[in-house]
Image (tube, rainbow, N blue to C red):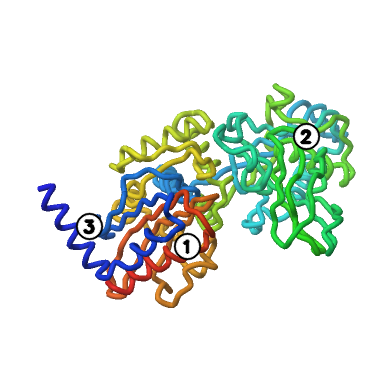
Amino acid sequence: MRIRTLILVTLISQALFSQQSAFETFLSDSSMRSGSVSFHLIDAGSGLTLYDHNSGKSLIPASVMKLVTTSAALELMGPDHTFTTAIGYNGILNSRTGVLKGNIIIKGGGDPALGSEAFISYYQNFEQDWVEQIKKAGIRKIKGKVVTDDSYFDYQPVPGKWLWEDTGNYYGAGAFGLSLYDNSYEIHFRTSSDGLTHEITGIFPEECRTGITDMLTVSGTEDHGYVYAAPYSTTGWMAGTIPSGENDFVLRASITDPPLLMAEIITNRLKASGIKISGNPSTERIDPGSTEDFVEIDELVSPPLKEIAEVLNHESVNLYAEHLVREMGKKFKSSGSADSGLAVIDEFLAAAGINSEGIFMEDGSGLSPLNSVSAEGLTGLLHFMKTKSKYSEVFFNFLPEAGREGTLKNYFRDPELENRLAAKSGSMTRVRAYAGYLKTVSGKELIFCIIVNNFTGPSRNIVTHIENILKEIIISN
């Protein structure tokens, strides 16, 4: 039976790649002499393998790993799952004088998108709305402080297997029980055309202006600037190069302590509105017990998971993926840690019958270079989500359409691919990966995954080869 199956796969592969030029040309390219490829193509309905090249080989997937995280989150928590952030107080409130002998408290509920510009309709002016709610509660003076409670998750916001180079930058922002503004801030620069000087013209939010040493230089036209800072730190440095001749160049860095920043921002807003506060902003982590006996004033509900996960995959937002991992741990193992969440995902894959032999997850976003998956494992997952998930249509919307949306907006723009390819991309140094759904000219629906590691030369060259491979599949079937 095994011999017959192999013969059938071979015959189908020959039919799919009658000339076999695109894939063979790719493998013979000099950029792949030291490279590795895992490629799998299956029928979307039956799951039958149509083409296989090292599909069981486990390679670094980069952001394609987000498909695993969002599949598990969607199946286990449902598309309408939301997160809640609450504001209130403790202590004694004198309703006659408006004096609160206690603290203003903001309790995080794991919302990954609080204050994000991607969801402005949900969060517009929420900070000022909270100030107004505090006033409506009759509070005019606070003999205490603003304290944020981010104990909803553990206090390990960054996976231990992430690179130090990443954690200070926006895409390496940690996941906190209380996150905000995508846990990133902007540093604005003006650079000279001769490349000799640069100056910081602004930091937004202003409260993020901390002890960051500037070791940047100006050179060329590309951004190679990095921020080096650890979670909870108040110091760090910027190094590398930023482009010359820029009137407003923006470097986006990660907020190292979002809960404390939230306390500082609300403190400043309250003072600006005329409410006096005697204490300095703090957090439950810094000041244990300061958020006990909470009396709720108001709460803010996040967008549903289906909207968060769509932005997560379209724009490849690492922060959102890490939040979903911890939320699954919190919900199903009563522990908002990355380890608990990853254990939940392992159990999901096993229950779904996915071949997870080559799936090694160190995070939920794919940022760690120690993650590893096989093309076979990912096509199996995509087949499950298409044929067995009751949320299959919702999941399909998570994937950007080639040439039009998200991380695929500027790729796969050939007319032959229009309306025929939806996929998640993954990229990091010497890694390019794609996984998703294809529709051929003849109407066949296929599922594919291709992961490429350790190539040499320009990454654009690898993407062009992948475009040619997928185009050949679409046109010849």
Amino acid type, mark 2: Thr
Q: Taking the image as drawn, is residue 354 in sight? A: yes
**Residue at image coords 33%, 62%:** 24
Name the residue carrying label 3.
46
Q: Nearer the viewer, mark 2 or mark 1?
A: 1
Q: Seen in the image, is 216 located left or right of residue 77?
A: right
Q: Are marks 2 and 3 in contact (CB under 8 Å)?
A: no
Q: Nearer the viewer, residue 33 or 475?
A: 33
**Relative image position of residue 422 (x, y in whole percent):** 42, 63
Quarter of the view holding residue 159? top right
Where 99 falls versus 62 (above or below)? Answer: above
Q: Nearer the viewer, mark 3 or mark 1?
A: 1
**Residue at image coords 31%, 45%:** 56
Label 2 vs 3, first from the N-terminus? 3
**Residue at image coords 69%, 60%:** 222
Q: Seen in the image, is 309 located left or right of residue 394?
A: right
Name the residue carrying label 2.
234
Amino acid type, mark 1: Val
